[in-house]
Image: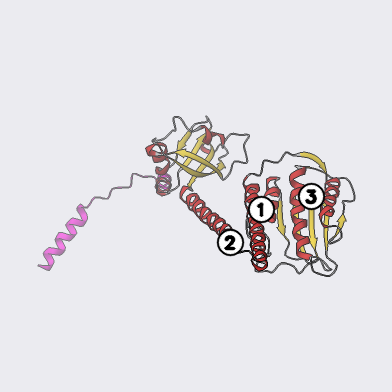
């Protein structure tokens, strides 16, 4: 029996056909790459030298409902890969999807250099869900801030209004008159605070596009210093350091004056009550950029508060509304610059340093 089985196995071995692979090594690598591309969840496209766009994987074919060439690619997508638009990497675009809706994609463009007849590669990252989540989170935070600030003002107003109404219903005496006056004064103060809060929110929401004009930096600093002294002269000293030579910079004068005044006022409020209260405003051309600094000699900013001082409506001062620093940063950013609280100040009397770079 064992001999018979061995004989049959030998016969089977001899009769088994050995068929060579019909796929060449180079084609095998191409097939592997195609499989990998098709399994990528990100829609991938490529542009040929004739300007046509083609889907490179299954996700792109599904998104644009094509088996290869895009017959009528969106003009907004083509605009990102025009030869004269080299800074179109990681842009945001909204594209139609199935069912008549649309979704937001982050577009990343890479140059192909003409290799294989390809001049550009495109990757589309679906960011709709992340943007919706971020928008919802921002809305929740905004509503929380608004409700907190409004309730902080309305609660004492409602309570004191009821108290004043009860006092008016009684026979007037000197004591009730004094209490009514105090209640009305508090109501007025809280109403003014609520008005300032609403106006500050409006300023943040309606900041217009800056009207950029050539401005002499030294003149801007001098005018800002005069505006500061009109409010703080006699209470807070201002040290002004002008650039050694004339520096012209394209700015919206009104908006930048507002940003600098917000920083100076913030510093002045921080030094009130301290010996020799001072703030400093300086401007210069350093490292191929305009650098404007505002310093004060107060107690400094606690390290636990540094990360939040630019957040809208966040204030660590007793009567602050959290608008000044946030508005200043928004103005500077609209000019293409940066506003930051420096981690360290130079040795000396100055304890806090805000720096604008343009």
Residue 304 is situated, as x and y percent measured from the top left of the image, at 65, 69
Q: In terms of sequence position, does the residue under pointer 2 or pointer 1 come before the other?
A: 2
Q: Which residue is mark 1?
A: 196
Front of the two marks 1 and 3: 1
Q: How is the image coloured?
A: secondary structure
Query: Residue 15: percent from the left, percent from the top?
Result: 20, 52
Q: Position of residue 343 (x, y in %)?
A: 72, 65
Residues under numbered marks 3 and 2 in contact, where contact means CB atoms less than 8 Å apart: no
Q: Position of residue 17 (x, y in %)?
A: 24, 50
Q: Residues within 10 Å of mark 1 (few under 14, many from 20)?
A: some
Mark 2 element type: helix
Q: Is residue 306 visible?
A: no
**Distance between mark 1 and mark 3 Cα atoms:** 32 Å
Q: Quadrant of the N terminus?
A: bottom left
Q: Quadrant of residue 301?
A: bottom right
Toward the viewer: 1 or 194?
A: 194
Q: Residue at x 68, y 69 (%)?
A: 303
Q: Is residue 11 a member of the stretch shown in magenta?
A: yes
* Residue 26 among magenta residues: yes
Q: Magenta stretch: give its range.
A: 1-30
Question: Can you name the residue that lies furthest to the left here?
Answer: 1
Query: Which of the two discs, 1 and 3, labels the residue nearer the N terminus?
Result: 1
Distance of mark 2 from mark 1, alpha carbons?
A: 13 Å
Label 3 belongs to which residue?
290
């Amino acid at each position: 029996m064992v001999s018979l089985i061995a004989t049959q196995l030998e016969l089977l071995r001899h009769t088994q056909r050995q068929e060579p692979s019909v796929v060449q090594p180079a084609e095998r690598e191409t097939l592997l790459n195609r499989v990998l591309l098709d399994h990528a969840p990100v829609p991938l496209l490529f542009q040929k030298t004739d300007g046509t766009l083609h889907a490179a994987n299954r996700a792109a074919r599904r998104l644009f409902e094509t088996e290869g060439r895009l017959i009528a690619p969106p003009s907004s997508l083509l605009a990102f890969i025009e030869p004269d638009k080299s800074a179109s990497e990681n842009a945001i675009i909204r594209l139609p999807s199935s069912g008549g809706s649309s979704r937001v994609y982050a577009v990343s463009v890479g140059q192909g250099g003409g290799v294989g007849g390809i001049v550009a590669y495109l990757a589309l990252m679906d960011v709709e869900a992340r943007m919706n989540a971020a928008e919802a989170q921002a809305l929740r935070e905004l509503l929380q801030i608004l409700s907190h600030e409004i309730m902080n003002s309305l609660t004492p107003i409602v309570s004191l209004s009821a108290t004043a109404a009860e006092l008016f219903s009684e026979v007037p005496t000197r004591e009730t008159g004094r209490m009514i006056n105090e209640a009305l004064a508090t109501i007025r103060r809280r109403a003014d605070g609520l008005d300032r809060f609403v106006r500050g929110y409006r300023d943040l929401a309606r900041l217009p596009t800056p009207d950029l004009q050539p401005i002499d930096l030294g003149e801007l600093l001098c005018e800002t210093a005069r505006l500061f002294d009109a409010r703080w002269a006699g209470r807070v000293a201002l040290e002004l350091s002008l650039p050694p030579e004339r520096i012209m910079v394209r700015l919206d004068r009104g908006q930048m004056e507002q940003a600098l005044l917000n920083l100076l006022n913030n510093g002045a409020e921080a030094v009130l009550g301290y010996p020799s209260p001072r703030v400093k405003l300086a401007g210069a051309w350093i490292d191929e950029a305009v650098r404007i600094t505002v310093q004060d000699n107060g107690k400094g900013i606690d390290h636990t508060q540094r990360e939040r001082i630019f957040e809208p409506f966040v204030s660590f001062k007793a009567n602050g509304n959290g608008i000044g620093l946030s508005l200043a940063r928004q103005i500077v950013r609209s000019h293409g610059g940066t506003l930051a609280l420096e981690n360290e100040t130079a040795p000396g009397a100055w304890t806090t340093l805000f720096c604008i770079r343009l």
